[in-house]
Image (spheres, rainbow, N blue to C red):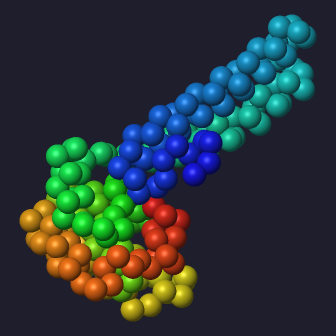
Amino acid sequence: MSFLNKYTKGQYEYAAYNKKKQLGYTIALYALSALIYLMGLITTGSNKNLLTIVAVLGILPASKMLISAIMACRVKSCSLDLKEELDSASNGLHGMYHVYFTSYDINYYLVHCVITTDSMIGYTDDKNFDFKKFEEHLDKHMKIDGISNILIKAFDNKDAYINRLGQLSKLDDSSKTNTKMIELVNNISV
């Protein structure tokens, strides 16, 4: 964990923190470009100067950061009550909160997911969640990263998900995780 990343992706607090961080960076970059433009305008009396070019070029990273901020704002947080319920059901499993996968066609939001050595299960409260396309999306990325033999399953029923968490936590190797799969999830999610 670095100075700029107070929380890591997957922690419950990360979604709210990431929204604030991305919005702060976006505002700062646009303000810096505006300040550079105004400095050039004030010092030369015209906008035909080198600082105007620098200010316009500064809009590019600011706009890229704006896209990141918009994506961060799309990730919604679950309630603390649900978090406590999922934490107690996870019982030592590697859980991740607010996992938002993006693809060209559709985005997939998991409130919570757990990754073990041979499976990844997740819970979504999205009523329009396309389970088949989600599994295909992850399978495609797993093949690219050379990950195989991982069962992918998403639930839209909280009780069924909590029941499955209980079953996984009772297995002998439930405390072990697949680090390559965790890296993959972190790389392809917001």
Instruction: Out of 186 and 170, give the one closest to the viewer.
Output: 170
Where on the picture, by quarter, is residue 32? top right
For image coordinates 36% across by 68% down, the residue present is 94
Where on the picture, by quarter, is residue 36? top right
Q: Position of residue 22 (x, y in %)?
A: 53, 39
For image coordinates 28% across by 74% down, the residue present is 121
For image coordinates 24% across by 84% down, the residue present is 171
Where on the picture, by quarter, is residue 107? bottom left
Q: Position of residue 147 (x, y in %)?
A: 48, 86
Position of residue 147 relative to residue 107, above or below, is: below
Work out whether residue 89 can be spotted.
Answer: yes
Left or right: where does residue 46 sit relative to residue 155? right
Left or right: where does residue 95 sit relative to residue 102? left
Left or right: where does residue 64 sit relative to residue 18? right
Left or right: where does residue 61 sit relative to residue 98? right
Q: Position of residue 51 (x, y in %)?
A: 85, 24
Q: Position of residue 15 (x, y in %)?
A: 40, 46
For image coordinates 55% across by 82% down, the residue present is 145
Instruction: Out of 150 and 105, give the one closest to the viewer.
Output: 150
Number of numbered discs: 0
Work out whether residue 128 can be spotted.
Answer: no
